[in-house]
Amino acid sequence: MQPILLSLITYLPLVAALVAFFAPGRPEQQDSTARWVGLWSSLITLGLSVLMWLEFDPAQPGLQFETRLRWMGDYGISYHTGVDGISLVFILLTAFLTPLALGAGWRSVCTQGRQFVAAMLALETALFGLFSAQDMLLFYVFYEATLIPGSLMIGVWGGPKRVWASLQFFLFTFGGSLFMLVGLITMWLQTGTTDIPALMHAGFSQPLQGWLLLAFLLAFGVKLPLFPLHAWLPDAYSEAPTPASAMLSGVLSKTGAYGLLRFGVLMFPDAVRLFAPYVLALGVVAIIYAAFVAFAQTDMKRVIAYSSFSHMGMIAVGLFTLTAEGIDGAIFQMLSHGVVIAALFFCVAAVAWRSETQQIDALGGVARQMPVLALLAMLFTMANVGLPGTGSFVGELLVLMGAVHVSFWVALLAGSTMIMGAVYMLSLYRRVLFGGVKGTVSLLKDLTAAEIAVLAPLAIVTLWMGVHPGSFTRLFDPVIMQAIHGSAANVASAAGHSVLHVAAR
């Protein structure tokens, strides 16, 4: 049952995408049928993902729900999937956000509804495949597959600059992934296999580790994004339709951090120690730079876009502290950030859709007309700032605990995200929600039941992660602890061999 469950979760959305795309009837009927097919199939997928969570054994740090099929056996390539605690939490995040994104797009995406639903479900399948892939070539295929629906959603249903934003997103990501392909081929030539568990124990030489890590940094640094590979992000996030913005920032950007963790921190420990100071510096620069730029924005969605960039810098810092606390914090922050940033995009969309503007200066006094939105937006604003009691606080605290082991100054500068985040987020909240009523704000109506149904689960999960973080950390902490201790043991063994060699001489 276990392998079948993972395959069912992965490919059920793809089947539903085909059903939605070829829905019969007149155009209006097709769109309506496709929306319901998308919503129900994504909810069923979410239920199956929760079932997999319940059947998962956190005490076993190895792979579970494994499937291995012969693909190109003569070349050491197979269809190999499975999940550990790290993969599982990202599968849950994807399954959780997809039905909410489809619900959020019910009214806002008015044209070509069945095509949009099909693109969203195809993206979900690609993300599931990416997070569960245990073969490098399979990972690369799913990684590239996310580009097609992602680019289409921006380019077809986006804002006035959608074509340029879509083109930037595609070219940056596709160009970066070429470095991953070169690294993949290099590892295959060295080992004769693309199986990820086998590559984890391949024992690459330190110079080769350095070149491979550089290739993966360029590949995944674009998706994260690392400074200065972020040029595509503001336009893509702000021009994309709200459901796509939520998926791009909530899940798709996490594929970059996930790749750096899998094919950097855990696979090339020797090279990571050499690169860590430079990546930590880039992470700190991203945190500070993006915060200042966010404060200067006049468009609500661009403020949230740069806020996302700043928080992803915090995640990069956590990953490259090379401590259990820092890496645990980075993973937890990825999950929390995915929930909170999606919620913020949904809140912004609720105001922009009613007022027909995203410009901050054109808004004011929204809280008087939309008190329920004001309450939920305050919760998500505080979560984005890192207020205790929310998931973001737990993730940032763990990252800072890991950063202190590396450098006091790294921890101090990375921690500035809490202060600067409060400045630009509370400024945005004050200017839009409070003050005198401007323009058409007096005509706005509060959230509908459907919109509350989208935002309420995000609010519950945000508080759940803050109050009971152990329900998530217990899934991936054993994997990280095993990797950290294994790496330390290898270093100690290498040091012991060096001492014996010197003594023998």
Image (tube, rainbow, N blue to C red):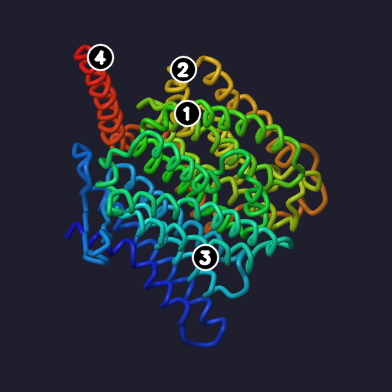
Q: Which residue is mark 3?
A: 149
* Among the two numbered marks 1 and 3 on one chain, the one whose residue lies closer to the N terminus: 3
Few, some or many C-alpha atoms within 10 Å of disc 2 (few <14, some 14-19, many ≥20)?
A: some
Q: CA distance from mark 4 to mark 1?
A: 29 Å
When the figure is inspected, residue 387 is found, relative to residue 165, above or below; the finding is above
Left or right of residue 64, residue 382 in this image? right
Q: Which residue is mark 4?
A: 502
Instruction: Assess whether mark 3 and mark 1 are in contact (beta carbons under 8 angstroms).
Output: no
Give the x, y percent position of residue 128: 37, 57
Q: Secondary structure at mark 3?
A: helix
| Amino acid found under the numbered disc labelled 3 | Pro
| Amino acid found under the numbered disc labelled 4 | Val
Q: Nearer the viewer, mark 4 or mark 3?
A: 4
Q: Which residue is drawn at the image coordinates 71% and 45% (left, top)?
A: 366
* Among the two numbered marks 2 and 4 on one chain, the one whose residue lies closer to the N terminus: 2
Q: Which residue is drawn at the image coordinates 58% and 60% (left, top)?
A: 170
Q: Nearer the viewer, mark 2 or mark 4?
A: 4
The quadrant of the picture occupied by the N terminus is bottom left
Is residue 53 at least partly visible in the picture? yes
Q: Which residue is mark 1?
A: 276
Q: Residue furthest bottom?
A: 25
Give the x, y percent position of residue 409: 55, 16
Q: CA distance from mark 3 to mark 2?
A: 40 Å
Left or right of residue 16, residue 242 in this image? right
Q: Secondary structure at mark 2?
A: helix
* Among the two numbered marks 4 and 1 on one chain, the one whose residue lies closer to the N terminus: 1
Is residue 79 at least partly visible in the picture? no
* Among the two numbered marks 4 and 3 on one chain, the one whose residue lies closer to the N terminus: 3
Marking on residue 404: 2
Q: Secondary structure at mark 1?
A: helix
| Amino acid found under the numbered disc labelled 1 | Ala
